Image (spheres, grey):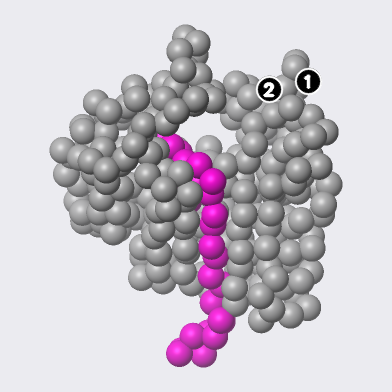
Amino acid sequence: MTYADTIFKQNISNILDNGVFSEQARPKYKNGKTANSKYITGSFATYDLQKGQFPITTLRRIPIKTAIKELMWIYQDQTSDLGVLKEKYAVNYWDEWEVANSGTIGQRYGATVKKYQIINKLLDGLAKNPWNRRNIINLWQYEDFEETEGLLPCAFQTMFDVRRGADGEIYLDATLIQRSNDMLVAHHINAMQYVALQMMIAKHFSWKVGKFFYFINNLHIYDNQFEQANELLNRQANAIEPELRLNVADGTNFFDIKPEDFELVNYEPVQPQLKFDLAI
């Protein structure tokens, strides 16, 4: 199995064997039933991207192109307008979180990035002093939560660190902190999104990507997913490590990078694809 598949199976087994059930769960399934989950607290993994350790499972297909489009909606377009997501990127599933027929997901995600000029300040800070320890994206803004209704950010904080390797090259490391994560559906989507973001920033400065650290506070499997979880545990995949590539020149401006510039190679996920009912 690949490095990511090994971690994936370990997490699934840990949740099924040692997890506890949620109480007073907020999410609902589309049929209105409460979406309870079994969860563990405090999951952490390290991926060395230079060694080909990308956080994407081959035990089920991950829609990486859609994930990257969603990322660019948040950090390049800097909007929560669902029309932009649908018309520019043909991504529709965020409609489930539309706020009060507003055509948006509220003052969240991309709207927060724009309001506080988060990406601009991050890039400016890295340009002025790459070695500082204050290169942080923080989407957890209480003022925004009070301004409108909307889904609270799950992947809410990212930290970036620059280091010089033994080979003399400059590497960009990234740490993603997530308050809550659906292990079977969203885990590798979120991880690969933020690896893509890490790669975009590294290209902007002509650096190499280094390590990706991933911490999740509440890692869970929903109670209608246990059958799929056991199916994934029983699946076997080849040991070829997939690789995400960003095919643009070093120094390409962050805002000029497009979804089609990314290429996922050596990715041969196990079929058939599994189906999951979203918890909303």
Amino acid at circle 1: Ser
Q: Is 29 drawn above or below residue 232 in the view shown?
A: above
The answer to whether 155 appears left or right of 226 in the picture is: right
**Which residue sits at x=49%, y=85%?**
165
Viewer-nearest residue: 117 or 157? 157
Dot 2 lies on which element?
loop
Q: Residue placed at 47% from the left, 56% from the top?
A: 215
Give percent across and percent down for residue 136.
68, 63
Amino acid type at circle 2 is Glu
> How would you rate the neighbour count of disc 1 (Cα within 10 Å): few for under 14, some for 14-19, many for 20 or more?
few
Whether the magenta-drawn stretch holds residue 169 is answered as yes
Q: Along the line of sight, which residue is nearer the eye, 19 or 73?
A: 19
Name the residue carrying label 1: 102
Q: Quadrant of the N terminus?
A: bottom left
Residue drawn at x 82%, y 33% is 147
Say the numbered circle drawn on residue 98: 2
**Quadrant of the image containing the C terminus:** top right
- Measure the alpha-carbon separation of dots 2 and 1: 7 Å
Q: Is residue 51 left or right of residue 95?
A: left
